[in-house]
Image: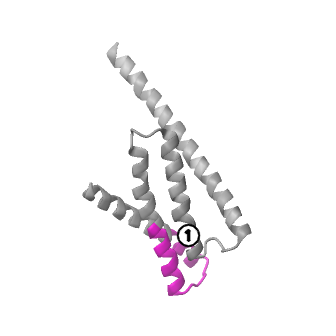
Amino acid sequence: MIVEGLKRILLGVAVGSLITFVVLSFLVMLDINSTIQEIWKHWSASMALGVYYSLASVIFELERWSILKQTVIHLSLTILVFFPIAILAGWIPFNLLAMILGLGIFLTLYSVFWISAYFYYKNMERVMNERIDRESN
């Protein structure tokens, strides 16, 4: 369990760092300068979110929980983790309108990803069941 947790943490750091690298590459191509402090702040936030998301994926592996319970807990934890990090990193300004707009965009994207994953796994389930049926006949 500890080894799996460490693997997930390293994966999260890698993904967060990769995202930061891609953004920095665009800044270089567009000849936009930034301070080391600004880069460090965004890189740290990306890595922290990468670690969170890699660890939080465990929630969807708990087979004894319903998909509704998994989703509500994951969404709630994600909001509690994402918004403070996003506000501290300056991705979302600390004012009511920006936070409401940010929450709306966040919930829309979360819904799109959740629905996409749901239908992907439903299709995978259907294909696997068809294969089992074919092989058992």
Three-letter code, disc 1: Pro
Quadrant showing the N terminus? bottom left
Residue at 39% in and 43% down:
62
Few, some or many C-alpha atoms within 10 Å of disc 1 (few <14, some 14-19, many ≥20)? some
- In magenta, the rendered stretch is 22-48
Residue at 49% in and 40% down:
67
- Magenta-colored segment: predominant secondary structure: helix
According to the image, label 1 marks what residue?
84
**Helix, strand or loop under label 1:** helix
User: 105 and 63: which one is in front?
Assistant: 63
Q: On the picture, is 131 further left or further right than 89?
A: left
Give coordinates of residue 92: x percent, y percent.
64, 71
- Residue 47 drawn above or below residue 36: above
Give coordinates of residue 25: x percent, y percent.
52, 73
Give coordinates of residue 109: x percent, y percent.
61, 53
User: 52 and 109: which one is in front?
Assistant: 52
Residue at 54% in and 62% down:
80
Q: Is residue 84 among what the camera can see?
A: yes
Residue at 57% in and 66% down:
83
Which of the 4 quarters of the picture holds residue 5?
A: bottom left
Quadrant showing the C terminus? top left
Give coordinates of residue 74: x percent, y percent.
50, 52
User: 89 and 95: which one is in front?
Assistant: 95
Q: Is residue 15 among what the camera can see?
A: no
Inspect the magenta stretch and tell me whether residue 46 lies in it.
yes
How many circles with numbers are drawn on the protein?
1
